[in-house]
Structure formats: structure tokens, C-alpha cells
Image (tube, rainbow, N blue to C red):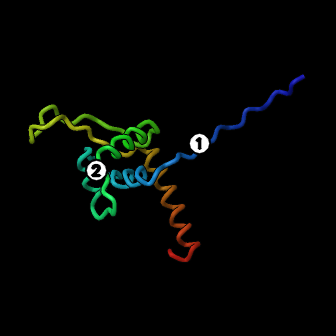
Amino acid sequence: MAQKRKDKPQTEKPVRLSAIDEDILTVLLGREFYGLEILDELNQGRPITLSFGSLYPALNRLEKKGLISWRWGDEVDDSGGARRKYYKVTGVGANTLSGIQQYRLRLAQRSGQG
């Protein structure tokens, strides 16, 4: 007779983030930006410039993981351009980023760099 397994309490699986994902969360933390603003913030002083082709797939990944959310901007834009999509970090995203930043700090301290 097969033994019945007791259900273990489900623990949250760690969320994997690429360096670009982490950079985007850092830029958006406590702020709300549309795509071009995010790109401008990310590319200031960046050794390898990030393009829209890298940004939007990363934003989609972060949204699917529940780390960011978005809203549409006003229908009519002052510049006459397309309607903007504004992104911000969710609570889960802020907690995930905080955990990663704390880990990096501990890692730097252990290596004598912090």
C-alpha cells in the first residue's frame, strides 16, 4: 500500500534575474517610467549601450514574473507621439530586488570589497 505524503508548505521559488532585469528593477524602484526613459536611465555611463531590442523582452519577462506592472498613459501626448506605457516595480519586485542587493552586499563583504 502506498504511503500518503503529507503536503509540505509551499515556499516561494527564488526568482531568476539577469543583469539587465536587475538593472531595470533598480531604475524603476520608487519611480514610474516609459520605455525611452528607462533606456536613457540605463544607458547613462553603461559600457555597452542597451537597445530597445533588449529592453522590451526584459520588460515582458519581468511582467510575466510579477515583478513589474504597467499602465497606459494619456491618449494624447504633448509630443504628438504614440501612447506611452508606464512601468513600475511591484511589491514582489521590490522584495526580490532587495534580496538580491543584500546578497551582493554580503558577497562583497566576504570578499573584502565591502
Residue 38 bears which disc, if any? Answer: 2
**Residue 32 percent across, percent down from the top left:** 28, 47
Image vertical order of residue 99 relative to residue 10, above or below? below
When asked about the image quadrant of residue 5, the answer is top right
Q: Secondary structure at mark 2?
A: helix
At label 2, the amino acid type is Ile
User: In terms of sequence position, does the residue under pointer 1 or pointer 2 come before the other?
Assistant: 1
Depth check: give the residue in front, 75 or 40. Answer: 40
Instruction: Sort mark 1 into few (<14), some (14-19) or many (20+) by Cα contacts within 10 Å.
Output: few
Q: Label 1 vs label 2: CA separation?
A: 28 Å
Q: Quadrant of the N terminus?
A: top right
**Residue 70 percent across, percent down from the top left:** 32, 37
When asked about the image quadrant of residue 66, the answer is top left
Q: Nearer the viewer, mark 1 or mark 2?
A: 2
Image vertical order of residue 94 relative to residue 64, above or below? below
Taking 5 as reference, is 69 left or right? left
When asked about the image quadrant of residue 60, the answer is top left
At label 1, the amino acid type is Glu
Q: Secondary structure at mark 1?
A: loop
Which residue corresponds to the image point at 47% horizontal and 39% vertical from the top-left? Answer: 65
Which residue corresponds to the image point at 43% horizontal and 43% vertical from the top-left? Answer: 67
Disc 1 and disc 2 in contact, CB within 8 angstroms = no
**Residue 69 percent across, percent down from the top left:** 36, 39
Taking 39 as reference, is 114 left or right? right
Instruction: Sort mark 2 into few (<14), some (14-19) or many (20+) by Cα contacts within 10 Å.
Output: many
Which residue corresponds to the image point at 27% horizontal and 61% vertical from the top-left? Answer: 44
The furthest residue to the right: 1
Taking 96 as reference, is 43 left or right? left
Q: Which residue is mark 1?
A: 12
**Residue 25 percent across, percent down from the top left:** 39, 51
Which residue corresponds to the image point at 28% horizontal and 50% vertical from the top-left? Answer: 38
